Image: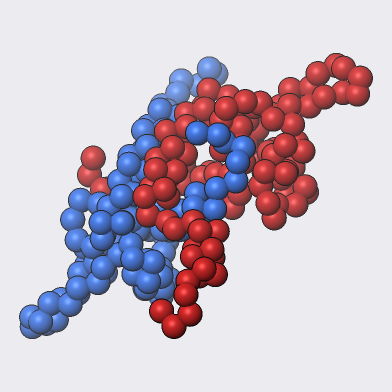
Chain colours: A blue, B red
Amino acid sequence: MKHLEPCPRYERAIEVLGKKWNCLIIRSMLSAPRRFSDISNYVEGLSDRLLSQRLQELEQSGIVERRVYDSKPVMVEYSLTEKGLGFRQVVEAIQRWADQWEANPMEEALARKYQPEGT
Amino acid sequence: MKHLEPCPRYERAIEVLGKKWNCLIIRSMLSAPRRFSDISNYVEGLSDRLLSQRLQELEQSGIVERRVYDSKPVMVEYSLTEKGLGFRQVVEAIQRWADQWEANPMEEALARKYQPEGT
């Protein structure tokens, strides 16, 4: 792979992945279809209005599929299409990088809290 | 991997990768150190002011290293640190996804141009 040649395909993929929240929304659906509230609870800080917009965009890009079950009450589930599931390798590569290189903010805070004074 | 558990590390990684232009800037340095103008030429649409800001942020995050050579004229090179090179798997996973799922806009335009009328 030559990394100094522009690649419009790569840039389009980045447009999807780079859009705020998308990487988390996609991650939430990797192992199973989810209801709106599942995703909303998982992605902290994301408003329902914006989640709804993102899901619609992802549906239009053929990445997410919305399925309505004719039950009472009606149930709506979101899942990744084959194209969406193709992001698994990307999500997992990001996770591996994160596990290796990013400190966990919770652990950092604990370490600070329990660090003997004067060290 | 459980995909419905929040992961602060993953979210931090996304903050870096999701920031506009970063994925392209990182990609440009994967195979060799680059000069400012190399990166600027490669990432179309990115102003020099913003590239300079992004490189500084990436340097502060320990992802990019800036090296000044005491030559005449002075040469400045940017390269990825070990942490930055860790993004190779991410970039390559995005590229594979893009090659499989995204149409090349150039090819699409050509296909439209050469499509017989009335089809």
**Residue A33 is drawn in which quadrant?**
bottom left
Height in image: A63 above or below B21? below
Residue A34 image offset from top left, x and y in percent: 21, 63
Does residue B108 appear left or right of residue B56 in this picture? Answer: left
* Residue A42 visible in image: no
Query: Residue at 59% of width from left, 52% of height from top?
Result: B20
Residue B15 image offset from top left, x and y in percent: 51, 47
Residue B98 image offset from top left, x and y in percent: 42, 50
* Residue B64 visible in image: yes
Height in image: B40 above or below A70? above
Does residue A1 appear left or right of residue B20 in this picture? Answer: left
Query: Residue at 44% of width from left, 83% of height from top?
Result: B118
**Residue B110 is drawn in which quadrant?**
bottom right
Height in image: B53 above or below A119? below
Q: Residue at the right extreme?
A: B72
Depth check, front residue: B13 or A66:
A66
Does residue B3 appear left or right of residue B104 in this picture? Answer: left
Depth check, front residue: A5 or B110:
B110
Height in image: B31 above or below B70? below
Query: Residue at 42% of width from left, 56% of height from top?
Result: B102
Residue B84 image offset from top left, x and y in percent: 54, 30
Does residue B11 appear left or right of residue A34 in this picture? Answer: right
Query: Residue at 54% of width from left, 70% of height from top?
Result: B113
Q: On the rendered image, what quadrant is the C terminus of chain B found in?
A: bottom left
Depth check, front residue: A22 or A99:
A22
Q: Residue at the left extreme?
A: A71
Q: On the rendered image, what quadrant is the N terminus of chain B found in?
A: top left
Say how many tags the image has. 0
